[in-house]
Image (cartoon, rainbow, N blue to C red):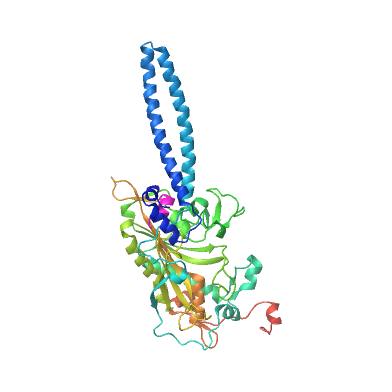
Amino acid sequence: MISRQFLRENPETVRDALENKGVDDVDLDHILEIDEEWRDLKARGDDLRHERNEVSSKIGQLKQEGKEEAAQEAIDRSGELKAELEEVEDRAADLEAKLEEALLELPQIPHDDAPVGDDESDNVEIAREGFDGLRDLPADVTPHYDLGEELDILNFERGAKVSGGGFYFLQGEGARLEHALIQFMLDLHREQGYTDVFPPIPVNSASMEGTGQFPKFVEDAYRVGGDNDDPYDEDDLWLLPTAEVPVTNMYRDEILLDDDLPLKHQAYTPNFRREAGEHGTETRGIVRVHQFNKVELVNFVRPENSYDRLEELRGEAEAVLEELGLPYRVLEMCTGDMGFTQAKKYDIEVWAPGDDMDEGPEEGGRWLEVSSVSNFEAFQARRAGIRYRPERHESAEYLHTLNGSGLAVPRVMVAIMEYYQNEDGTVTVPEPLREYMGGQEVIEGHEPVGESAVGAGEKD
């Protein structure tokens, strides 16, 4: 949330942010009108309060002097002022509620360095790593969704049977590989100075508002009871879309000390999102699903340090791919593609060679986003009321929050299954993961279970 003062003093900057971020459903002039009327009413209320105090202070004196008629006139005037003040205060309170609601609809102001653009085609590639000395790949790399079923480590049919489309089962070595990835990421980030947090999975509406998911993205959330179209209260519960929500809101409405900062928390959670995306090869398999595992990195820092921390955070997320030996690139996101809450954002995309896409690298395959690394400046802190006190005797100020995935697990799984695929259809386990898999070096799969496998000729 941007402050009222910033809006009043910089309306054209806010207007530019709306345009550059592609937000066209906000009437900024109407918001400014509400704010102006609210300020006029607050000033009128102050005047009425001052006049009423002056009138009231004279009543006793007039009575003492025997001026009963003048005293009664003062009493009547005091009553009139009280009634008018109540009317002004009621109107001001109503406008303030509308103003607070309207401010939630205004996006973060992009950083001056952020590329201005309309969509993903205007993002800027700033780094590409890991393409020197690529490992030998099969002549035809089998996409992960086919390979996973051939090895019987991915099962989409049973996932859909149990939970519906967009859900899946990991089985045997597939499940073991995912567990290994999660633990590897947690161990790596712990070495980078992160403190582990295991947060609640349901989060309330106030927490979703605090990090900027609500009210804009209600339709993407999984509500615990009730319909998404129904009005929600602060205490209504939702399945978390990202650990960013509970971890950031740990400190909602609190004041941290300067000595506490920077705070670096990491959290592994399952994440739930209704967004289905487009159908087809772009999203087939486990690229875009309704439930997925992720390790999230959340930072709380002093405002003057947040952009240095952003670059460090990016490096901490990239380290996962570097350790795993997976080729990747980094994009600096343009204003139209960076999102509602971000001031500056990087996307880290891993290379998956199984499906050739038009926007993929010259080596073939496609890019899969595995992390968005973002600086929210004080946007989330202001919404969630998270402040810090620079010195014990100084006033509390809003701190800056940052986060990035470290990383989204399913898409890293896709990259491993395709990049570490062998000619015989097995998958080499990246060396850093082997200690988490009991020393296993190759995923060979296993025989399917059930009569359906016999009928398909997969099992004698």
Could you tell me which quadrant the C terminus lies in? Answer: bottom right
Give the total number of marks visible in the rendering. 0
**Residue 342 x, y percent position in the rendering:** 42, 60
Res. 184 in view? no
Decide whether residue 380 is among the magenta residues: yes
Q: Is residue 144 above or below residue 257?
A: below
Which residue is at a point 28% across and 49% down the rendered structure image?
391
Res. 282 in view? yes
Which SS does the magenta portion mostly show?
Answer: helix
**Residue 290 x, y percent position in the rendering:** 57, 65
Magenta residues (range): 377-385
Which residue is at a point 57% across and 81% down the rendered structure image?
147
Which residue is at a point 40% across and 85% down the rendered structure image?
133
Identify the residue at the far top of this view.
Answer: 66
Decide whether residue 234 is among the magenta residues: no
Q: Is residue 334 above or below residue 256?
A: below
**Residue 69 x, y percent position in the rendering:** 42, 13
Q: Quadrant of residue 16?
A: bottom left
**Residue 340 x, y percent position in the rendering:** 46, 59
Q: Toward the viewer: 33 or 321?
A: 33
Q: Toward the viewer: 311 or 379?
A: 379
Q: Toward the viewer: 375 or 79?
A: 79
Q: Is residue 139 above or below residue 180?
A: below
In the image, is 279 to the left or to the right of 3?
right
